[in-house]
Every structure is written in C-alpha cells, then in structure tokens.
Amino acid sequence: MSELRTQVVGPDDWPAVGAFFEPKGLVENCWCTYFRMTAKDRSSCGPGSRKDRLREMVEAGERVGVLGSVDGAPVGWIGVGPRLGFPRLRGSRAAKLIEGDDPERIWSVVCLYLTRDHRGQGHARRLIDRAAEWARDEKADILEAYPEDDRDPGAAVDRDSFHGRVSTFEACGFTVVEPRLQRRALVRRDLR
C-alpha cells in the first residue's frame, strides 16, 4: 500500500485539485463552495460557476483545503480554513457558536472526502491531522468540525456524507462538545 502525501493547497495546485473534483465536482457538483457562499449566492451559481469560483480561489492563494495524493494521484480532500471564511456556517444549527466563542480564532473543517478505493486505510486521519497542523501554524486556537455521529452502533449514519465521522475525529484528538441535529455533533480540537 502506498503512502498518502498531504499538502496544503497553494496557487499552483489547481490542476491536481481540478482533477480530484472532476468530472462532477464530487458531491452534487459542489466544488467545495457550499459553505463558502451564502444560500442566495449559491442558488444563482451553477456547477460551472462553482468550479470557476474554486479555481479562482486556489489560483489566488486563498486558504481552501488540504489535498491528499497517493503515487501522484489525488485521492482525498479536506475543506478547511478560518471559520469566518464560510458564510454558510453563520446560520447552521450544526455549527452554531457556543457562548464566549471568538469566531476569529476558530478554523472549521467543512468537508472531508476520499475516493472509494482509498477509504478505510487511515487516510482521513492523515488529512485531519495535516489540517490541524496547518490551522495551528496559522495561529488558530480551535479547529472544529460537524461530523456524522457514529458513536451509537445502532444509529443510521449517512454513508455518502462529506462531513466525516465522529469516531475518526476523536481518533485525531477531537472532543465531542455536544450532539447537534439528529445525527451530527460539534467536535473540537484545542490547538493552543
């Protein structure tokens, strides 16, 4: 089994990012824009425009995520960055701030995705750890995520979810702050 190589996406990485998201922008032609746009903006923005938006962000050097590759082929993605860069989180019940939070000091994991043939190999943990390292380097106090809560073996978990699983985040040093919605949880890792 080849090792996963992780890298914070930079301005020259669009060819690899584009190749990973093709041909359909992964989950419902999202192009990792769902949380980066308001609902109004996204509803008027088709898949081609979402792709262009992500490409523009990558090429401009914006902080958009970490890409994982095996033998030079992109196989994993974690959308992560400063919480304030994700306008959709402001109205999200899953991502509701806790009293006393300083959103300027929090980074958010908004999506986690691996190609089917690279799941179950520990790659998600490697992507999460690299995202935490990057957030710490950028002086974030907290890295949070909103994964599917798989702690109850009898609970129905959305297998196609792009949020990750609580158990995976816990294995990376995150703590469940509180359950959210029916099958989700707010998890955080203190980076201080």
Image: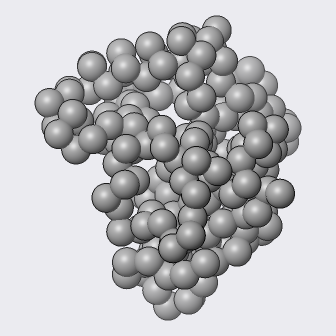
Examine the rendered structure and indicate whether residue 112 appears above or below residue 95.
Answer: above
Instruction: Residue at 62%, 52% (x, y): give it.
Output: 106
Is 127 placed left or right of 13 in the picture? right
Instruction: Residue at 54%, 11% (x, y): give it.
Output: 59
Task: Give residue 81's position: percent from left, percent from top.
Answer: 59, 40
Examine the rendered structure and indicate whether residue 29 appears above or below residue 60.
Answer: below
Examine the rendered structure and indicate whether residue 95 appears above or below residue 90.
Answer: below
What is the count of numbered marks?
0
- Residue 188, picture quadrant: bottom right
Task: Give residue 25's position: percent from left, percent from top.
Answer: 38, 31
The residue lying toward the viewer, choosing from 89 and 162, is 89
Task: Give residue 67's position: percent from left, percent from top.
Answer: 66, 32
The residue lying toward the viewer, choosing from 111 and 179, is 179
Q: Is residue 74 visible?
A: no
Examine the rendered structure and indicate whether residue 187 appears above or below residue 122.
Answer: below
Is 78 placed left or right of 175 in the picture? left
Instruction: Residue at 58%, 42% (x, y): give it.
Output: 82
Is 30 placed left or right of 135 in the picture? left
Task: Give residue 164's position: percent from left, percent from top.
Answer: 56, 60
Q: Is residue 12 visible?
A: yes
Question: In the picture, which quadrant includes the C terminus?
Answer: bottom right
Q: How is the image coloured?
A: one colour
Question: In the picture, which quadrant includes the N terminus?
Answer: top right
Instruction: Residue at 58%, 47% (x, y): give it.
Output: 104
